[in-house]
């Protein structure tokens, strides 16, 4: 059976400079590679919350494309929402560069194997004249992927020790198939979310330094059964879980305030 997939990604790609705005991508920055390599990451990541649900039919919580018009006997879906706690560990006052962007891969895996992978960009700049709009994030061959459209958080003048909660969420539907993501989820005994640091790009004047990391795991959790789905929760008090929308446990304005 040929699987027909329709994807909807809800990851937010924004620069926070007083207020949030959408970050344009698709431009190139041509610059020489700087000789002096900055070889330490700036950001740390942990996963305080993740929720996953698989079902026959489509989720009303997500807006699927109009092309999905099949009934519950023909289609299956899953939604996967993860919140990352992002912390800047570097002091920008002592880092004599314009900006830093770090690249992460988020994998949903099981004891059987890989189910899904997506990407997250995290960055900051201390030079207000530096423009992210001049940088092309989907550069072929960087960090072994050109799929850097998964979203990210780019915040001007991020301060040392400041943590921000940020979502990386999405949903997928397909015709029922023995090799679909939903089938892989249902057949798994254990499900994990793992965050890998792929590397980073440091900008200084007209130079760009690229550092790659290999198999650099920065966070991992295991999801356990909760109601109709699977949950990992170190974010919401347990007594409040029945009262909240499990897909959206924290309002967006609370994450960036």
Image (cartoon, grey):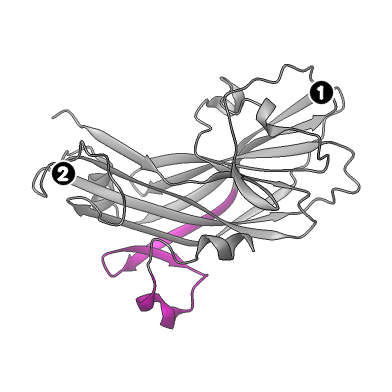
For the N terminus, the image quarter is top left
Figure check: 251 above or below 13:
below
Badge 2 or badge 1: first in the primary sequence: 2
Figure check: 69 above or below 160:
above
Viewed as shown, does residue 206 lie left or right of 167? Answer: right
Q: Name the image quarter holding residue 141.
A: top right
Residue 29 position, x and y percent, is 70, 20
Residue visible at 57% across and 24% down? 26
Residue 59 on the magenta span: no
Q: Name the image quarter holding residue 184.
A: top left
Residue 78 position, x and y percent, is 29, 50
For the C terminus, the image quarter is bottom right
In the drawing, what numbered circle is on residue 207?
1
Figure check: 190 above or below 205:
below
Frontmost residue, 222 versus 130: 130
Q: Name the image quarter holding residue 243.
A: bottom left
Q: Give the residues in magenta.
A: 218-244
Figure check: 24 above or below 252:
above
Viewed as shown, does residue 23 lie left or right of 163? Answer: left
Frontmost residue, 61 versus 222: 61
Residue visible at 49% across and 29% down? 147
Say which residue label 2 marks: 75
Label 1: how many Cα within 10 Å (few below 14, some 14–19, many 20+) = some
Residue 222 on the magenta span: yes
Residue 163 position, x and y percent, is 68, 60
Residue visible at 58% across and 29% down? 25
Frontmost residue, 173 versus 181: 173
């Amino acid at each position: 059976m040929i699987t027909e997939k329709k994807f909807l990604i809800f990851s937010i790609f924004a620069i926070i400079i007083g207020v949030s705005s959408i970050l344009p991508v698709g431009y190139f920055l041509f610059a020489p590679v700087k000789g002096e390599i900055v070889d330490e990451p700036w950001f740390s990541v942990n996963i305080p919350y993740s929720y996953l649900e698989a079902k026959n039919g489509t989720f009303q919580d997500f807006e699927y494309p109009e092309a999905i018009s099949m009934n519950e006997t023909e289609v299956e879906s899953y939604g996967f929402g993860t919140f990352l706690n992002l912390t800047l560990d570097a002091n920008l006052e002592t880092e004599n560069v314009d900006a830093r962007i770090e690249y992460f891969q988020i994998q949903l895996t099981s004891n059987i194997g890989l189910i899904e992978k997506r990407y997250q960009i995290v960055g900051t700049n201390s030079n207000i004249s530096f423009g992210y709009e001049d940088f092309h994030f989907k550069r072929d061959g960087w960090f072994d992927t050109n799929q850097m459209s998964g979203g990210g958080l780019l915040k001007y003048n991020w301060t040392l020790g400041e943590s921000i909660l940020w979502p990386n969420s999405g949903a997928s539907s397909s015709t029922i198939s023995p090799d679909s993501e939903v089938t892989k989820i249902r057949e798994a005994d254990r499900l994990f979310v793992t965050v890998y640091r792929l590397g980073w790009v440091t900008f200084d004047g007209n130079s760009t330094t690229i550092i790659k990391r290999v198999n650099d795991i920065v966070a991992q959790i295991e999801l356990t059964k909760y109601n109709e789905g699977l949950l990992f929760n170190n974010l919401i008090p347990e007594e409040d879980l029945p009262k909240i929308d499990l897909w959206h446990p924290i309002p967006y304005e609370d994450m960036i305030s």
